[in-house]
Image (tube, grey):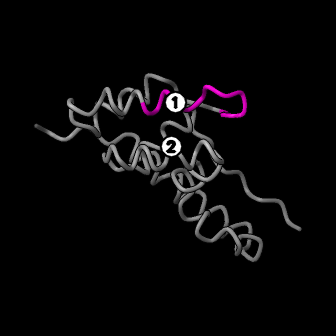
Amino acid sequence: MSETPYQPIPKIGDEDVERIIRRDFPLALQEQVRAALARYGREPWEREPPRVRMAILRLAHGDAAAVERHLRIAKEDFRDVLAAAEYPGASIEWGKLSALTPEERARLHAADWDQYRAWLARPAAEP
């Protein structure tokens, strides 16, 4: 079995999560979203809270109800939200990754990484 090419892992802090909450949610919903996200990371098995919270935000697309849905998924298995948010192309092709050449896997991972970074850097919409 060949080695999987490197998949970038974002370095996310609480300040990044807060910036995305302010960017993607109206002021009236921001405290609700913060409170929901704060429920992830309380248990010792709930790993990488800022990174997982960011994944939840990305998957929610500015929808507070979707934050709750993805939070439930993360509390069951945080890897599910990380894969869907950070590696959408690779997660769709997960069963086929071993059949890809290292170059094809690297391109898939690079495309996912570019997409994630573009989303993260997107500015807030003008009011």
Task: Please say whether residue 38 is one of the residues in the magenta stretch.
Answer: yes
Q: Residue furthest top?
A: 15
The residue tagged with tag 1: helix, strand or loop?
Answer: loop
Location of the C terminus (image quadrant): top left
The location of residue 69, given as percent across then percent down, is: 45, 50
Image position, residue 30 (x, y; %): 29, 30
Q: Considering the numbered disc 2 on the image, is that residue within a helix, a strand or a loop?
A: helix
The rendered magenta stretch, by its main secondary structure, is classed as: loop
Residue located 71% across and 51% down the image: 6
Q: Which mark is residue 99?
A: none
Q: Tags 2 and 1 in contact by the CB under 8 Å rule?
A: yes
Label 2 Cα neighbours within 10 Å, binned few <14 / some 14-19 / many ≥20: many
Give me the residue at 71% from left, 70% from top: 97
**Mark 2 highlights which residue?**
71
| Residue at 71% in and 27% down | 44
The crowd level at tag 1 (other Cα within 10 Å; few <14, some 14-19, many 20+) is some
The number of numbered badges drawn on the structure is: 2
Q: Is residue 124 left or right of residue 60?
A: left
Residue 120 is situated, as x and y percent measured from the top left of the image, at 41, 41
Residue 4: quarter of image? bottom right
If you read the primary sequence from the N terminus, does the residue marked by circle 2 or circle 1 appear first? 1
Per the model, the C-alpha gap separating discs 2 and 1 is: 8 Å
Amino acid on which the number 1 mark rests in the picture: Arg
Is residue 34 placed above or below 89 in the rendered structure?
Answer: above
Q: Residue 69 lies in magenta, yes or no?
A: no
Q: Which residues are magenta?
A: 36-47
Instruction: Judge by depth and name the residue closer to the eye, 28 or 125.
Output: 28
Q: Which residue is mark 1?
A: 39
Residue 85: % across, % down: 51, 51
The one nearer the camera, 100 or 55, is: 55
